[in-house]
Image: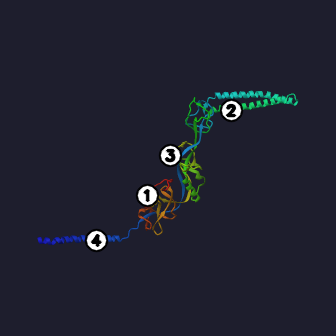
Amino acid sequence: MQLNKDIFEPLKWSIVFITLLSGLLVVGCDKSQQSSQPPPVPEVATVTIQPERLLLTTELPGRTTSYLVAEIRPQVNGIIQKRLFEEGSDVKAGQVLYQIDAAPFQAALDSARAALAKSEANLPAIRAKAERYRALLAEKAVSQQDFDDREAALKQAEADIEYWRAAVETARINLGYTRVTAPISGRIGKSNVTDGALVTAYQSLALATIQQLDPIYADVPQSTAELLRLRRRLDDIRLNQNGKNQNRVKILLEDGTEYPLEGTLQFRDVTVDPTTGSVVLRVVVPNPDGLLLPGMFVRAIVKEGINEQAILVPQQAVSRDPKGNPIAFIVDDEGKIQQRRLTLDRAIGDKWLVASGLATGDRVVVKGLQKVRPGVTVKIGPPEHTDRAEAGKEVGSTRKPN
């Protein structure tokens, strides 16, 4: 038995070695067969570029300001006897707001009228005496000096009458100023004085302020860079301005809701603010319900024009090269990948508006970008297989590319 064990022990290890060697040979053959097979052609999804008619808008922040503002100040000195309005109410032009003590001004008017009546009463006698002296002078019954004195007295009497007439008018105007009235229609704010307060003519502190709120202004700044870009597009005939509709402006409120009435672009300022590098656009907005108040933050959607040949590409189709420049991959007629460098204008929803780099009919890769590189042959799959997560991205229309 010991002999048999000595014989079979080397034989057992030989069988194990042969088995391991056979396994290694089989694995090697499998790998060689796999390496000899060509790599699969990557499959991508594309969209074909077609120009679109696109209305271009710019969303700008701004604030509302009153259409008209009137600060109420007294024009005569006196004591406030009564405030005749309710704070925060709507007032009409000509409505009496304050009553200043009118007694001194009434007395001044009565005095001026009396002085005028006295001058007018003396005038006929002086005029008659001057006429008699003129007749006597013709007969040389009086001296020239006596006649000149009578003529001077007549002219002085007539001048006195004109003076007191002016004094009466001045006193009447001052008496009218004791009734402080509203110069414009609008909403009046709080009163800065109470009954019994002493006021002076043209004082620095306004008694109250009236603001006209319908319509109301929305002042929105536009950067000069944006203004120059718009003018360049207009010079290149890339935008078509749509007549009077070009001046219509939509307003968004602070909470993001759209204001129901459109405003009208009144003018662009001609002066650039050196601190912000922007010019002010003034929009007139109807405000019949008084929803918009002065100083409120709003966003104005200003129409720039219509691009008749706009090229839009999905945002997931645009990537960046190592330098940060926007690029896109297209599939040429031979089924090979080509790289295009793009110039982006702005984001429109979930797409980029392309200023240059793509042409009509280009097939842009929107899915499978990680599998491709320039010169690689690809197979185009159905576009509906595009990644939903990528296709669902949305960017506001006013965001500019970096």
Q: Is residue 16 above or below residue 395?
A: below
Regarding residue 1, the answer to whether it shows in the image is no
Residues at badges 3 and 1 in contact (C-beta under 8 Å)? no
Residue at the spot 47% in from the left edge and 58% down from the top edge: 315
User: Looking at the image, which residue sits at the far left?
Assistant: 1
Q: Mark 4 or 3 closer to N-term?
A: 4
* Local SS, label 2: helix
Residue drawn at (67%, 27%) of the image: 107
Task: Say if 73 sits above or below 335 in the image.
Answer: above
Cα–Cα gap, marks 1 and 2: 79 Å
Q: Is residue 101 visible?
A: yes
Residue ID for mark 3: 254
Q: Residue at 25%, 71% (x, y): give it.
A: 21
Disc number for residue 390? 1
Q: Disc 2 vs disc 3: which is toward the camera?
A: 2
Label 3's element? loop
Type of amino acid under label 4 = Val
Q: Could you tell me the amino acid type at mark 1?
A: Glu
Identify the mark nearer the N-term, 4 or 2: 4
* Mark 1 or 4, nearer chain start: 4
SS under mark 4: helix
Q: Which label's residue is closer to the chain start, 1 or 2? A: 2
Q: Residue 66 versus residue 48: which sits nearer the camera?
A: 66
Badge 2 amino acid: Thr
Q: Compare residues 126 and 388 and report the one nearer the observer.
A: 126
Distance in Å between CA atoms under marks 4 and 3: 73 Å
Task: Give the foreground label among 1 and 2.
Answer: 2
The percent position of residue 392, horizontal first and vertical second, equals 44, 56
Query: Are the two marked residues, 1 and 2, in contact with CB atoms closer than 8 angstroms?
Result: no
Quarter of the image containing the N terminus?
bottom left
* The disc label shown at residue 26, or none: 4
Marker disc for residue 170: 2
